[in-house]
Image: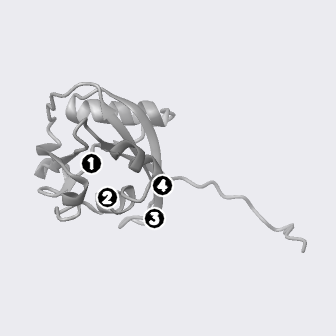
Amino acid sequence: MNTYDPNYVHQDVFAIVGQKAVIVNDLGEVLLLQRSEKAGAGGQWSFPGGALDDKENPYEGIKREIREETQLEVSDIAPFYVRSYSNKENKFVVIIAYTCAPRTTEVILNWEHNNYKWMTKDAILAMDLTQDARFVAEHFENSPAVKQVLT
């Protein structure tokens, strides 16, 4: 079957690229952050992360977001889940979720968050999670990359 269309006009696709980090400590616990009212989704819990900057390498971007939000340095960064959807403003969003390990242990929160908890993976889904965090949490348990980190 010939799929050539002489009238086809290419349209650029633009997306907001968001990233989330499932940071797993030596005890197998995962870091969750509680959003502040100033940052939106106030009171809800999420994983560290945020939007990729223009022309930013994704690995550098997730390390930057983790550093900005928690002051943690991380290693062993591995993507395990990608999701795309249209948000409330009808903008195309792509979320990349990673696992990683903390190199440092002292969490110092920025203004975007009020609280943090290191939790077992089983307890996370019972939390009041942001939409993106819920999707990541629902998928990280079945990910081979996450299973390797958590065992």
Q: How far apart are marks 4 and 1 (CA)?
A: 15 Å
Categorize mark 1 by other alpha carbons within 10 Å: few (<14), some (14-19), many (20+): many
Q: Distance between the residues labelled 3 and 2?
A: 17 Å
Sooner in the amino-acid sequence: mark 1 or mark 3? 1
For residue 47, the mark is 1
Sooner in the amino-acid sequence: mark 3 or mark 2? 3
Element class at badge 4: strand
User: 92 or 18: nearer the eye?
Assistant: 18
Are the two marked residues, 3 and 2, in contact with CB atoms closer than 8 angstroms?
no
Sooner in the amino-acid sequence: mark 2 or mark 1? 1
Callout 3, which amino acid?
Tyr
Circle 2 or circle 1, nearest the eye: 2
Sooner in the amino-acid sequence: mark 2 or mark 4? 4
For residue 82, the mark is 4
Element class at badge 2: helix
Callout 4, which amino acid?
Val
Element class at badge 1: loop
Element class at badge 3: strand
For residue 137, the mark is 2
Q: Is residue 87 above or below residue 120?
A: below
Circle 3 or circle 2, nearest the eye: 2
For residue 92, the mark is none
The reply, left or right, for residue 25 in relation to residue 21 is left
For residue 85, the mark is 3
Callout 1, which amino acid?
Phe
